[in-house]
Image: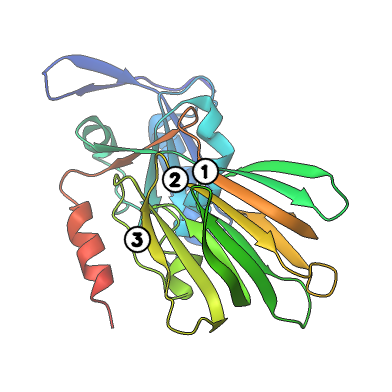
Amino acid sequence: MTAPKTKLGNKAGTKLSTKFCFVASNSEKASKAFADLQKKYGQHTPQDCDVIVVLGGDGFLLHSIREYADTGKPIYGMNRGTEGFMLNPYSIDDLPQKIASAQKITLHPLRMKATHTDGTTSEAFAFNEVSLYRQSGQASKIKVSVDNKVRLEELIGDGILVATASGSTGYNLSAGGPIIPLGTDILALTPICPHRPRRWRGALLPAEHTRFRFDTIDAEKRPVTAMADTQEFHNVASVEVKEHKSKSCILLFDASHNLSERIMREQFAP
């Protein structure tokens, strides 16, 4: 179908013509919103649009970031799911105006290189987190190095993860890690159910120049799996992780829906 072009004003008072691509999760709320928005504003492909509008929860938004990051188009999420920390409130009538005045946050993914126990290698990108976790009933044993210096000779437990700001409210938060404000150049290094050392709860490190390396100890007896978001790699001997600046995604947030306040509330949530 041919989509209508929506005229809207930006802060400079100029006229813009906005083409939307709507994508939705499988939930009933998201499907209805998809139909309503498509009827009102039309539909373009991800390659031909100006903005990709994601309808769903936080999990579907993060999935969409991975799916559409290479298009170079900004992503505006609206909450039509169960969680909505990274999403804007749902609104159909004033969508063009909200997008025109939205706050922009640039996300960069992590680049993971895994070396398997058979000597082969795998590479992947993750906008949320790279995690290592035990593959069997045996606790994992992992040597942790940061910037070519060993920081933990042996971490015993279920595993460890490196989370970006966008991924910090997911698996990282469930594992006891901190929430990182979007737009900050920080990564969270968080242990998963650590047994030894018991008092180590992780670290916050600058994203731009930090390089992580994880070496599995006794990998045959204690096999370890690595995950880059939803991509899974079994029987890893070592994993290297660093931020990848040349790849990015722009998220849009309502100017009136204070992102800093949302982050503050989440950190004091019961």
Going by the numbered disc 1, the residue's amino acid type is: Lys
Q: Is residue 83 above or below residue 92?
A: below
Res. 248 image quadrant: top left
Q: Is mark 3 on a helix, strand or loop?
A: loop
Q: Which residue appears at 44% of the width and 49% of the height?
A: 33
Inter-mark Cα distance, 3 to 2: 27 Å
Residue 204 on image: x %, y % = 36, 59
Inter-mark Cα distance, 2 to 1: 6 Å
Counting residues from the start of the chain, the first of labels 2 and 1 encountered is 2
Q: Which residue appears at 32% of the width and 58% of the height?
A: 180
Q: Is mark 1 on a helix, strand or loop?
A: strand
Query: Do tag 2 and tag 1 residues touch (Cβ < 8 Å)?
Result: yes
Residue 68 on image: x %, y % = 54, 35
Q: How many neighbours does mark 1 have within 10 angstroms: few (below 14), some (14-19), or many (20 or more)?
A: many
Q: Is mark 2 on a helix, strand or loop?
A: loop
Q: How many neighbours does mark 2 have within 10 angstroms: few (below 14), some (14-19), or many (20 or more)?
A: some
Whether residue 80 appears in this view of the structure is: no
Going by the image, does 169 lie left or right of 31? left
Q: Which residue appears at 28% of the width and 83% of the height?
A: 270
Going by the numbered disc 2, the residue's amino acid type is: Thr
Going by the image, does 46 lie left or right of 261? right
Give the foreground label among 3 and 2. Answer: 2
Going by the numbered disc 3, the residue's amino acid type is: Phe
Circle number at residue 210: 2
Res. 135 image quadrant: bottom right
Circle number at residue 85: 3
Q: How many neighbours does mark 3 have within 10 angstroms: few (below 14), some (14-19), or many (20 or more)?
A: some
